[in-house]
Amino acid sequence: MSSIKTKSSFGVAQVILFLSIAILVIVVAFPVLLILFNAFWVNDEFNFAGALEIIKEPQTFQALKNSLIIATGTTIGSTIVGTFFAWLVTRTDLPHKTFMKSMFLVPFMLPSFIGALAWKMLLSPNAGFINQFFIQHLGFTGPIFNIYSYIGISTVEVMYLFPFVFIQVCGALERMDPTLEESARISGAGLFTITRKITIPLVMPSILSGALLIMLYSMAHFGTVAVLGIENGIYNIPTLIYERIHQSGGSFDAIRTGTVLATVLVISAAIIIYAQRKILGSGHYQIIGGKSFRPMELKLRGLRMPLMIFCLAYIAFTIVLPTVVIFLVGSLKTYGLAFTFDNLSLDNYKFILFDYKVTRDAIFNSVTLGFTAAIITMFAGVMISYVIVKMKVRGKGILEFLGMLPFSVPGSVIALGVILAWSGQFGINLYNTVWIILVAYIARYMAFSLKANSAALEQVHDSLVEASRACGATMWQSLRDIVLPLVRPGMLAAFFLIFLPSLRELTVSIMLYAPTTRTIGVAIYTLNEDGETVISAALAGIALIIIILGQSVINHFTKKAGV
Amino acid sequence: MDIIRVEGVAKSYGQHQVHKNLTLAIKKGECFTLLGPSGCGKTVLLRLIAGFESPDAGKIYIDDTLVSDVTHRLEIPPENRGLGIVFQDYAVWPHMTVFENVAYPLKIAKRPKEEMRERVMKMIDIVGMHELDKRLPSELSGGQQQRVALARALVGNPSLMLLDEPLSNLDANLREEMRFEIKELQRKLDITVLYVTHDQEIGLAISDRVAVMNETGEIQQIGTPWEIFEQPINPFVFHFMGIANSIEVRRENSAYLVGNGQQPVPWKSPEGDTAHWIAGFRPSDVQIARDGEGLRGIVRRANFLGAMMDYLIEIDGVHLRTSIETHRALSENLMFKTGDICTIRFLNLLWFEADKVKEAAQP
């Protein structure tokens, strides 16, 4: 066996590279290109003016403005809330800080459109429970708060998005070298001056980068605006795309408006991501090392108890209250009945799980779609990350660029793109089937898989593979026997990072569903639209339970694997 | 017969030219060491031979089979070159037990279960890992992991084994022990070993032949350890082999005079017209005496270092250091005081032209 075999297994690297590029092109790049093409290419010629015309139409222009208004409001609100709470739990002697910190992260796993549904039940101008309570019992003549408004929408988005800033700022504050502040203190600066001149400038990059993430997310966000805005005629870009495509059944005009709006989203996303990289790369971070320090804690003194009560109230109001409302409404026999013991039962849950075909199908669809998408994306992601992280092969630059795409393409853009690509124009018609949703899920969650898998692959030293090559293993055998077993924790993480969010996915599925291919998200949304509030709430409750269980499984695994 | 032939190989990474027109032959059955300072490209050469990198120009033969040839776009992948390789960081697979690690090459070669078990257990025994076959690498020390890596490289009976600084991550005692074991294994299994290191001690200790490489990847000298050590061919090898001691000698007419004085060097003189020379020597080649034949000098400093006496001696403006065991100094009346006159004899002097030595000292 030590004899030399001259037969060469040529081109394995090229095959993998080609496959990786092909996957990203077919799943992400091609649909996005089609959007750009459709937006600017009319009647066989480039038409930029036409695209501008569409943007200038009152309704589209209003949608652009609304996206911007809501995103700005959400970003400012989330940044203030996120930074404030981050400061409270890292730099003060607030009681029960660890508990508070974990509670502030809970909104991360709650789907915001379910939250929006809860707030609609609580604060819709006429039927909302809180508004009704104030009108009936406290003598108010009108609703105290109208959730169907810019402020209402932004407030609900803030509740679910602020953790983006919170996490980043917490991390920065925890890793900041306390001597930087201590030396300012020794120089005679007061706490206020230190905060203003030292602390805030140092954590500014983290605050800004979190804020930009929220901006990106909010501009392309569908669920909350769809639940709370449409009633009052407030459309943002994704909801308008949905409305147009949905109403017209895919007419040319609707598609064109959609593609122009989607182009605006893609460009904004690209600018935001570029800005975020600039900020994170701008060296400010060098002062914040990787080491954990014990930071200087501010004594809150008299404010300690009031601030703790404030935090608890915030948690109760924004996390506990909406969740409880969802479960209570889901248990009501009929919507509108009072929450008395007689009116509550588990019948709805039994009904949607066992008897009602629509919800049973939806749960089945979501679970199978999520599972399949997670498996495929996990394997595709590990292969693509392998090329990007490990392989030295010509043409890798293209792949690195393509690999960036999934991170910057919003869900509604992907949905529109797959409609353009897989509705028969190119020989394959997946429209109205479950497969088109699958393709879109793969595109949407590729970014998660790439992130988790490249992190795991960075840990596998090159010499481990070279050693197996030297032992006579081909590249395939080395991948199978050495690389795959070693990146399994990363792949598992990728699987759950895709499977769980896909269970509650709404933005993509709402654009692609057919009567038999509803997902859980679509079912909750459409049932609610159809006035089946109670059933919709019950299904939302089931979704919440699945998500929380799944999240516990993830936490268990990631803790064990040390990812 | 040559087992490896490297012919006119060039390799560069971007702007950085690591090798240009490198030629080297390694004989079957020998233990050959590639010795050079860090960053000189010796690991690159090993990786070129192994097939992990492809050359920009030139040919590489293993066992008279062409394995890399740029002009014909021939590139045999590493797995088909039939080599055993041991890496600096061991590269023992963390998810496999010792047995599975060592058995892997045989598993890939689809050997029957029985034969596999027998050969693996034998190899584990040979490297002294008896009864540790069920352990995972995380339960092994660095030295044990390196033994697993050795066993894995050897289990497939390769005719050629490449070792890339395999001992540099081990502590000093273990390093010494392992280097003799590697030599022992090489003899026992009758294989060719190409060993890459920057540590001249290991290179000299285990090799049949050594090639010394300079910073720019050019091979300076190939020879037996003894040749390299005793007759460094040029100032680079001279410095690299750790001969730091030297005296300046100038030529006047046909006489070779030390420093700025008038004492001629009474030993073999160099050949050449150069006016300024450096005579290199090892501390062990210096003999100090009260009188007799040799160069006259003055003891400038005498240090008592316990077991050794250390002297700084001046001979006509040049300084050199020598040491002698204290007990010998006492018994042979060689305890000098500062200011004493002494005589210095050299058992062996290596002559280099002064200009070239200075060049080598300041690359």
Image: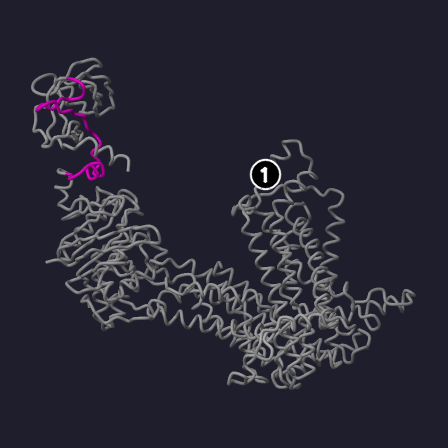
Camera-side residue: A34 or A470? Answer: A34
Tell me if residue B260 is in the magenta stretch: yes
Tell me if residue A470 is in the magenta stretch: no
Q: What residue type is labelled 1?
A: Leu
Camera-side residue: A20 or A85? Answer: A20
| Residue A433 point in image, percent of width and height | 57, 84
User: In the picture shown, does residue A510 fall above or below B217?
Assistant: below
Give SS at disc 1: helix
Farthest residue toward the top? B339
> How many marks overall?
1
Image quarter in which the N terminus of chain A is found: bottom left
- Image-quadrant location for residue A192: top right
The residue at 51%/85% (across/down) is A427
Mark 1 burial class by Cα count in 10 Å: few <14, some 14-19, many 20+: some
The residue at 72%/76% (across/down) is A330
In this picture the colour scheme is one colour
Residue A4 located left or right of residue A520: left
Residue B260 located left or right of residue A117: left
User: In the picture shown, does residue A366 fall above or below A131?
Assistant: below
* Residue beneath disc 1: A180
- Chain under disc 1: A
Q: What stretch is highlighted in magenta?
A: B232-261
Camera-side residue: B194 or B155? Answer: B194
| Residue B73 point in image, percent of width and height | 26, 66
Residue A387 located left or right of residue B324: right
| Residue A290 point in image, percent of width and height | 52, 47
| Residue A486 point in image, percent of width and height | 40, 63
- Image-quadrant location for residue A299: top right
